[in-house]
Image: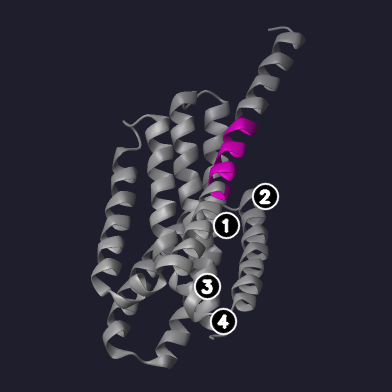
Amino acid sequence: MDVTRQNSLLSDAVAIQRSFINGVFFWMTAGLAVTGASAWYTATKYGALVLGNSSVFYILLIAEVLLVMGLSAAIRVISPAAAVMGFILFAVLNGVMLSWLFLVYSTNSITTTFLSAGITFGVMGLYGWLTKRDLTSAGSLLVMGLSGLIIAGIVNLFWRNPMFDLISSAIGILIFVGLTAYDAQKIKNLSIAVAEGKIVQSEGRKLAIFGALELYLDFINLFLYLLRFSGNRK
């Protein structure tokens, strides 16, 4: 194979990888924007309905869980357009769910915590992207830790211990700091596989949406645990 042909193939691979990465971060950013807008709108127009009706909360929670499970299970068979629609719908539902933040925490606290989460997310994402260390085993441990944290959170719904809530928030921050690095490395590896043709581009477009969802969830949860740990209530 001549040098010109090699350079052309390399250039194509770089373009494909860049397109995949751009897709991941575009949809992640779009999801965060949609969530923020729907949260603010719901708090402004329908805050009392969401906060005052536990049935609405649980319906939204169940819908979110089912939607994420459905997207995860069907990502291989649905079209890229369906994946996008599912992700945006989830972002809207999550925004409605999080509308209570604007009613409980001060705007300044939400803003500063969001910026802190953004900086932390960026640093750990960059670490996950650049490190030569394989984070797969660490990621598995973090997922196990997250499962335990979810169970502990459910228990504390009934126990209502403030100190336990503070400790679990600190642990949650550490878990999602680690998961951010892990998911960033996983997305890097996926982008390489797409660029090398190991994953067809149509499949890659769907995986980009799923990667965006994973990073979106990392950021949202990192933000929420930081807010619970150090946020100022109204």
Q: Residue furthest top?
A: 2
- Relative horizontal placement of residue 200, taking residue 181 as reference (left or right): left
Q: Residue at x 56, y 25 (%)?
A: 196
Whether residue 87 is visible here, answered yes or no, is yes
> Which badge, 1 or 4, is on the more N-terminal residue?
1
> Which badge, 4 or 3, is on the more N-terminal residue?
3
Amino acid at pointer 2? Leu
Query: Mark 2 — residue?
Result: 130
Q: Residue at x 30, y 82 (%)?
A: 157
Toward the viewer: 135 or 106? 106
Query: Mark 4 — residue?
Result: 231
Whether residue 135 is visible here, answered yes or no, is no
Query: Mark 3 — residue?
Result: 173
> Which badge, 1 or 2, is on the more N-terminal residue?
2
Q: Are marks 1 and 4 in contact (CB under 8 Å)?
A: no
Q: Residue at x 60, y 38 (%)?
A: 21
Q: Please, what secondary structure does the residue beneath circle 1 have?
A: helix
Query: Mark 1 — residue?
Result: 181
Q: Are marks 1 and 2 in contact (CB under 8 Å)?
A: no
Q: Is residue 96 above or below residue 234?
A: above
Distance of label 4 from label 3 (alpha carbons): 13 Å
Distance of label 2 from label 3 (alpha carbons): 21 Å
Q: Quadrant of residue 85?
A: top left
